Image: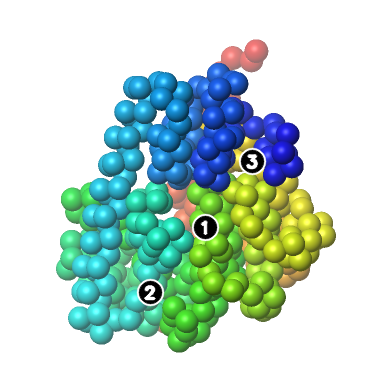
Amino acid sequence: MPRDREPCAEFSAELRLLLAAIRSDRAWACEVVGSESVDWESFRLLAIAHHVLSLAYRCVAELPSGAVPAQVLTRLRQQFAANSIRNVSLARELVRIMRGLDESSIESLTFKGPSLAIDAWGDITARQFGDLDLLVRTRDLCRAAEVLTKLGYVSSISARARREAQRFGGFQEFEEVFEHRDGNAQIDLHWRLTPASFPLSPPETELFARAGAVEFDLLIYLCVHAAKHGWSSLGAITDIAALQKRIDNLDYAEILSCASQLGARRAVLAGLLLAAQIADAKIGEKILLEASSDSAVRVIVGRAIGGIGQSIQMRERHAEPVLLPLTSLEGLGARLRFIEGRFLRPTLGDASFVRLPRGAFPLFWLLRPLRLATQYGPAMASSARRRSSEPAR
C-alpha cells in the first residue's frame, strides 16, 4: 500500500472511495471500485454526512463507463445539481443581506459558506453548505438583528435576551440563528468567531481592522473550528487542504506564531497534519515534523482518524464531541475554562427565563440549575418512575 494511504488502511471501501474523491485521485478510485464491492447507498450517505457531496459526484462521474451503477450516478448527479443551485441561491441571499447591513451602516464580515467556496476552491459549487455565517461587532448585534427581521428572518431568541447578551457578554452563545420565514435560508449571526469556552480566535477589533489583509487568519479559523467540533467532518479537513494550497507563499512560521499567541498552535498543527494524511495536502516537511513530534497532536490526529472511520450511526451518537476539543486546548486553565463554559456558563435561554437588573448578571449562574431542573426535571422524574415500575428481569 502506498505510504500516503496507510492512515486509511482500516477504512471501509466506501470511505476509501470518498478519500480518493477528496484527493482527486482517480487511480485510487478505480482501484477501489474495480477490486472491492462498494455499497453505493452507504457511499452516498457518507458523502452527505461528511459535507463532500460535490467532490464525491465529480470523482465517480469521471470513472470509466459502467464502473458506477447508472441509477447511483443519476441520483448523485441530481443531488449535485440541487446543491449547486442552492449554493448560488444562498450566495445571492448573502449579497442581499450584506447590502441591507451596509445600508444601515453596520460593518459585517462573511466567512465559510459561499465565500469559503471561492477562497478555498475558486468554485461556488465545490462545497456543501447549508447556511450563511456573518460576523458583526458586539455593539451592532441588536441593530443587525433588526435588519435581518426586516429582511424576513426570525429567531427563537427574544429581543430582550439579545440585549442581555450585548450588555453582559458572559453567555455561552457566540452566535444567533435566524431562519427565513419561507424556510429557504438560515443565517448564523456571530458576534464572536468562537465560544468563550474555546477562545482561540482574534478579538473582533483585530478581525475588522485587517479583514482580508491576512489570508492565513481564515486558515487558523478553519483549524480552530474543526477542532471545536472534534474533527468529525472530512469536509472541514478538505477545506483546510484546499485553502492552504491557494495561499501564495504560505509562511508556516508566521502562521504558527500567530496561532501560538491565540492559544491555537495545537489545533493548527493537528489541522495541517490531518490535511496531509487525509486529503494528501502538500504541507512543508518542517511543519509536518513539528506536528508529528508533538505527542498531543499525534493523539488528536489518531483519534480524529479513528472517529472518521466510524459508521454514520456511531458518528451521530457522538455528534458533540468533548474529548478532542479539550485535548486541542493548551494548559490546565484553558481546559478548565472549556469545561466551565461548556457546561456551567449561563445561556441566552437563561436570560429568556428571567430578567435581571443591570449589574446582576452573576445571579444567572445561580438561576441556571433552577432553569435546568424546571426544563428537564419533570421528564427525568417521569422516566425514573417508569423504570421503577418495570418488573425486575
Which quarter of the figure is the C terminus placed in?
top right
Residue type indicated by callout 2: Leu
Which badge, 3 or 1, comes first in the chain's sequence?
1
* Residue on which disc 1 sits: 242
Residue type indicated by callout 3: Gly
Residue 77 occupies quadrant = top left
- Residue 296 drawn at (x, y percent): 77, 57
- Residue 15 drawn at (x, y percent): 57, 33
Looking at the image, is 302 positioned above or below residue 333? above
Looking at the image, is 143 positioned above or below residue 94? below
Q: CA distance from mark 2 to mark 3?
A: 32 Å
Foreground residue, 4 or 40? 4
Foreground residue, 318 or 76? 76
Residue at image point 46% right, 67% down: 174
Which badge, 1 or 2, comes first in the chain's sequence?
2
Residue 335 seen anywhere in this rendered image of the structure: no
- Taking the image as shown, residue 24 lies to the left or right of residue 338, namely left
- Taking the image as shown, residue 78 lies to the left or right of residue 118, namely left
* Residue on which disc 2 sits: 109
Residue 81 occupies quadrant = top left
Residue at image point 59% right, 49% down: 279
Labels 1, 2: front one: 1
Looking at the image, is 11 positioned above or below residue 37? below
Residue type indicated by callout 1: Ala
Foreground residue, 27 or 241? 27
Secondary structure type for disc 3:
helix
Residue at image point 43% right, 35% down: 62
Secondary structure type for disc 2:
strand
Secondary structure type for disc 1:
helix
